[in-house]
Amino acid sequence: MTAQTSNIHFTNARLADGSLVDFTVTDGRFGAITPAGSGPAMPDAVDLAGQLVVPAFVEGHIHLDTSFYGDAWRPHIPCTNGFDVRERVAFQAQNLAAAAPMAERAKNQLELCIGNGSLSMRSHVMVDASVGLSHVETILAVREKYRDLIDIQLVAFPQSGILSSPGTAELLDEALKLGCDLVGGLDPASFDRDVNGHLDVVFALAGKHGAGVDIHLHDGGTLGLFQVEEIAARTKALGMQGHVVVSHAYGLGDIPADALAKAGAMLAATGVAIMTNAPGNHAFPPVAALRQAGVTVFSGSDNIRDSWWPYGDGDMLSRANMIGYRSGFYEDHELEAAFDVVSHAGAKALRLKDYGLSVGARVDFVAMRAQHVPEAVVALPKERTVYRRGKAVAKNGTILAS
Amino acid sequence: MTAQTSNIHFTNARLADGSLVDFTVTDGRFGAITPAGSGPAMPDAVDLAGQLVVPAFVEGHIHLDTSFYGDAWRPHIPCTNGFDVRERVAFQAQNLAAAAPMAERAKNQLELCIGNGSLSMRSHVMVDASVGLSHVETILAVREKYRDLIDIQLVAFPQSGILSSPGTAELLDEALKLGCDLVGGLDPASFDRDVNGHLDVVFALAGKHGAGVDIHLHDGGTLGLFQVEEIAARTKALGMQGHVVVSHAYGLGDIPADALAKAGAMLAATGVAIMTNAPGNHAFPPVAALRQAGVTVFSGSDNIRDSWWPYGDGDMLSRANMIGYRSGFYEDHELEAAFDVVSHAGAKALRLKDYGLSVGARVDFVAMRAQHVPEAVVALPKERTVYRRGKAVAKNGTILAS
């Protein structure tokens, strides 16, 4: 007789298409998925009682090192002379000096995200001359502690630029050696004032380490578009299709339809994915048009109660709601698209293997009371159970004892 | 000895300024408000245990007659040829024909709002040739049933226009006689194609009944601005300062700063208030600039899961969050302004008497775990207790048995 101890049975799971199914979990992966009640009775099965079951969410862009979630309230200050990244970095340094230990703050944020149903994550971690590799070292250790609960990719993020912050290229190199998975970038034009110089360093490091690239690009309009084009061109030239992300890419939100169509085709052809958190008060990439063009658009919470803004709840389902709300998504297929952005599209952008609700995939899912995905996206049930590898790890926002 | 039966004592309430106070409720109104622990011990007092206490929210714009909240899911359909109000009204009629009874749907929506902490409300109720006064009659009866839980103002709302829907002026007149408190309007230019003709009817009815005015105005840009100016001019000419609202007023969101300054000054001088729900995908009135100009800006959920859009949670605290998110409000005073929009500014626009946390005012408040208002606006605690006239009426979203 073979070992059956790792088998778990679930019954009456409602899938996105409305069907009710039973499924078996073997070693954390989906075995058979069958119509509910069609197999032999399983007295030890977990009865999901018709709850909607969706793949666990993908938190595609977060900053684990800089949030004050769960720490003291830190009021924001006005911009001296319009928004300035350097000014914010200085404000952040001041806040961090007075904050609770980073590992504790990162843990607060992680548990918030896991409790809401994210089991895969990409976090940017600040690397610069002032903090060196200290943030990376701390967050690597936190990742290790939470490896049974969540899969985390880390981006070595040059928060103070690369060319304008001497020594940063070497620190990024070191961060990748230490265990960061991707190399980041920051506004090559507006921050470092040298698009090619900045991208030379980023892509050289990616090549050296076989790492992916995920660049923060806030520049709007045609300046933003130009950099998106440059990033896509390098991606193609270096054969890095599917390994490169532009985060924010605000410029794609305020260019004419013709320029957008051209950019969309280029992004689709080079497999450069776009991350947007659907910001509240400025333009952002048009989600529907880019998806239509074949571009992978995914999302993340970005900052959660940190020195950049006070908002954020670490809930990718409410992020899907925001994406829909900001995009004018009203029809069911549009609300489903908003959900795709925080689930399957995120998995594609993060190159997650074995994601989704299918035989052989990892059994990472969220169960909640909703008739279907569109209702979940508008109703945002906070009562939900999060399962990882087939085991409940969080319920109604609280991590369960392992 | 005087009757003391209606006295209720509360201790350890945290006010917006951080202070802890005790207070006494007499006949539903605030008696003394004193520093916590400064008076004699009250063994029967309700201990608020340091929870933040804020005035109950003001739901300033809702449609009690047309929501499907709590009813079957009704998928949205695409626009045939761009958004068209007439097309949506036809779609709404089709949906309503198949829906649960209106009284039941209105009750679902009311309990959602009360459970979240709104104890004052302004609802628009559709009046047109197709439905006649049937919606008004139903919602008047629902209002009566809920009078102990929530104060409701009703606007007779010409959903199908006035001039373009013969008989509507007479129906509006009748609706005001039946008990509606205000007369509504709908896009005098783009819908009825006759700004003066439309406003003549609206303001004549207001004068006849001594009723307020609350006009839906979706027209953007200069066409919207022109109508705002016309409404303000009539308000002044008729001595109706403080009795007129323009709901939506999208045009104020996409005009140059100079035109906005002029409009803001005119609105402030005439006491015409602006209602915005901070829509997701188009321009809306600039909240901070208008407040700065002295304009009363307030808010409402507007549609909740109806034929106009699928969104909405009936929670004015999360509406404050949306107003802040969409307005780029990051600093504490800005988050406080967002809260003011859903509380004191709403009370001013609705001309509520005895609103707020002060001696003599009605004891309608929400208690929740938050250090202060800015934290409440970003954290949106769903665990909250709603008190009306000093008595708990809802807890964590559920109406308490009376």
Image (tube, coloured by chain):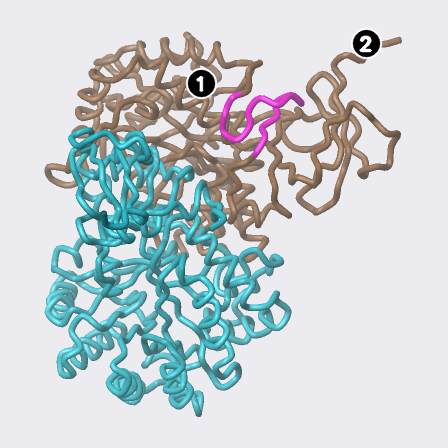
Chain colours: A brown, B cyan
The residue nearer to you, when weighing B370 against B394, is: B394
Label 2 marks a residue whose chain is: A
The residue that disc 2 covers is A3
The residue that disc 1 covers is A207
Corner quadrant of residue A182: top left
Label 1 marks a residue whose chain is: A
Q: Where is residue A77 drawn, in percent x and y?
A: 16, 34
Q: How many marks?
A: 2
Q: Residue A387: say if magenta.
A: yes
The residue nearer to you, when weighing B329 against B242, is: B242
Query: Which three-letter amino acid code belongs to the residue tagged 1?
Result: Gly
Looking at the image, residue A97 sits to the left or right of residue B185; the answer is left
Foreground mark, 1 or 2, reads 2
Corner quadrant of residue A300: top left
Query: Which three-letter amino acid code belongs to the residue tagged 2?
Result: Ala
Badge 2 marks a residue whose secondary structure is loop
The residue nearer to you, when weighing A229 against B124, is: B124
Q: Where is residue B212 drawn, in percent x and y?
A: 26, 75
Looking at the image, residue B392 sits to the left or right of residue A193; the answer is right
| Residue A281 seen in the current view | no
Residue sitting at x 53%, y 20%: A150
- Evaluate if marks 1 and 2 touch, with contact meaning CB atoms under 8 Å apart: no
Q: Do marks 1 and 2 both belong to one polypeptide chain?
A: yes
Magenta segment's dominant SS is strand
Query: From which residue to which does the magenta span run?
Result: A384-399
Q: Residue A97: say if magenta.
A: no
Mark linked to residue A68: none
Q: Where is residue A344 drawn, in percent x and y?
A: 58, 36
